[in-house]
Image: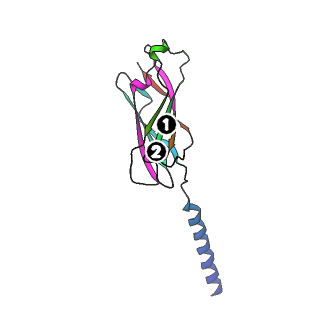
Amino acid sequence: MRYNSLRIMIVALLLLTLNACHKDKFQTTPTIRVKDINTTEVNAPDGLLKITLECTDKEGDEGQGELTYIRVRTNSTPIPDPTNNDKADTARTTVPAFPKTDKVEMVLTIPYSFLDEDPGRNDTMFFKLTLRDSQNHQSDTIATKSIVAKQ
């Protein structure tokens, strides 16, 4: 009888410990990861790059936060006629308001016109992304794989 009681207590303690380990699965600071990219080659003149992000946040307050994305051009040749062709590399967009949830998917859509800087050659780049929630907590910066803007 004592043996069964002891065994039940050990199993209960083990279950409580396992449950406690999963209690704080998400953090106050948002986390983001690239879940999907619709293509690695975006075609001129009106192609779209769609980056699907999976975001987690303990408070679920990503809505009305800010998503920052930075284009990092990796071509070895410089941009011809930078005065007319060079574009801003950094863009910020406000995350729309939505009901609080600890896990959400967002789709960032970037038009070809933002990707193309060299009118005579394909442009190769990757993006760095970071998310700041509505309480000003910022995620780590993540990077995408290489993307080509095709002429």
Q: Please name whichever residue, 71 or 82, is drawn nearer the observer in this view of the structure.
A: 82
Q: Residue furthest left?
A: 46
Secondary structure under the numbered disc 2 in the rendered image: loop
Left of 3 or right of it: where is 81? left
Picture quadrant of residue 1: bottom right
- How many numbered circles does the render carry? 2
Q: Residue furthest bottom?
A: 1
User: Where residue 124 sits: x, y (%)?
Assistant: 49, 23
Start and end of the magenta stretch? Answer: 102-127
Asked if 63 appears above or below 8 in the picture, the reply is above
Q: Amino acid at mark 2?
A: Gly
Left of 145 or right of it: where is 93? left
Secondary structure under the numbered disc 1 in the rendered image: strand
Q: Amino acid at mark 1?
A: Thr
The C terminus: image quadrant: top left
Point out which mark residue 68 bears.
Answer: 1
User: Where residue 29 sits: x, y (%)?
Assistant: 55, 49
User: Where residue 45 sits: x, y (%)?
Assistant: 35, 21
User: Where residue 43 sits: x, y (%)?
Assistant: 38, 24
**Which residue occupies 48% across, 11% down?**
81
**For residue 124: magenta?**
yes
**Which residue occupies 42% across, 26% down?**
114
Q: Residue furthest top?
A: 81
**For residue 120: magenta?**
yes
Give the Cα distance between marks 2 and 1: 10 Å
**Which residue occupies 50% across, 52% down?**
57
Picture quadrant of residue 95: top left
Asked if 150 appears above or below 2 in the picture, the reply is above
> Mark 2 — residue?
65
